[in-house]
Image (cartoon, helix red, strand yellow):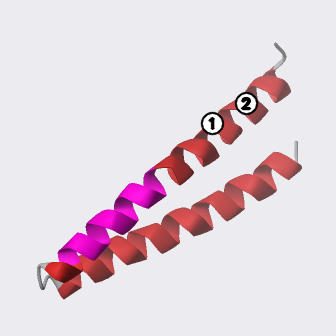
């Protein structure tokens, strides 16, 4: 496998990996909210937004290959 193809596969894996965790993060943010831990919920949601933004950049990188 050439390096470009390998890089594409790796980036695709990172995107899928990030997406696979989003549901879990959402559930735990909801749990934090139910426990009255609003600041914890907000931090988890902020992390989710950053991961989403990260995936946007990874998608752009993938298109550049």
Residue 9 numbered mark, or none: 2
Which percent across, then down, holds residue 11? 68, 40
Q: Give the overall secondary structure of the magenta segment.
A: helix
Q: In which quarter of the view is residue 39 placed?
A: bottom left
Residue interval drawn in magenta: 21-32
Using residue 40 as the reference point, say whether residue 5 is left or right of it: right
Residues at circles 2 and 1 in contact by the CB criterion of under 8 Å: yes
Crowding at mark 2 (Cα within 10 Å: few <14, some 14-19, many 20+): few
The relative height of residue 6 versus residue 34 in the rendered view (above or below) is above
Q: Is residue 62 left or right of residue 21?
A: right
- Please state which of residues 62 and 40 is positioned toward the viewer in this rendering: 40
Is 7 in front, or is 45? 45
Report crowding for label 1: few under 14, some 14 to 19, many 20 or more residues within 10 A (C-alpha).
Answer: few
For image coordinates 37% across by 56% down, the residue present is 24
**Residue occupying image coordinates x 79% and y 58%:** 60
Task: Give me the residue at 60% from left, 44% from top.
Answer: 16
Q: Position of residue 54 (x, y in %)?
A: 59, 61
Q: Is residue 55 above or below residue 40?
A: above
- Residue identifier under label 1: 13
How far apart are the alpha carbons under marks 2 and 1? 6 Å
- Vertical placement of residue 2 versus 63, above or below: above
Q: Is residue 21 left or right of residue 11?
A: left
Q: Secondary structure at mark 2?
A: helix
Which of the labelled discs sits on residue 49, or is there none? none
Quarter of the image with the C terminus is top right
x, y percent for residue 63: 87, 51
Q: Is residue 55 magenta?
A: no
| Residue at x-position 11% and y-position 79% | 35
């Amino acid at each position: 496998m050439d390096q470009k193809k390998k890089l594409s596969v790796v980036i695709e894996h990172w995107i899928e990996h990030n997406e696979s965790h989003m549901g879990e993060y959402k559930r735990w943010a909801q749990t934090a909210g139910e426990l009255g831990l609003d600041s914890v919920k907000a931090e988890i949601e902020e992390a989710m937004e950053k991961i989403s933004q990260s995936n946007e950049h990874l998608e752009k990188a993938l298109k550049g290959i």
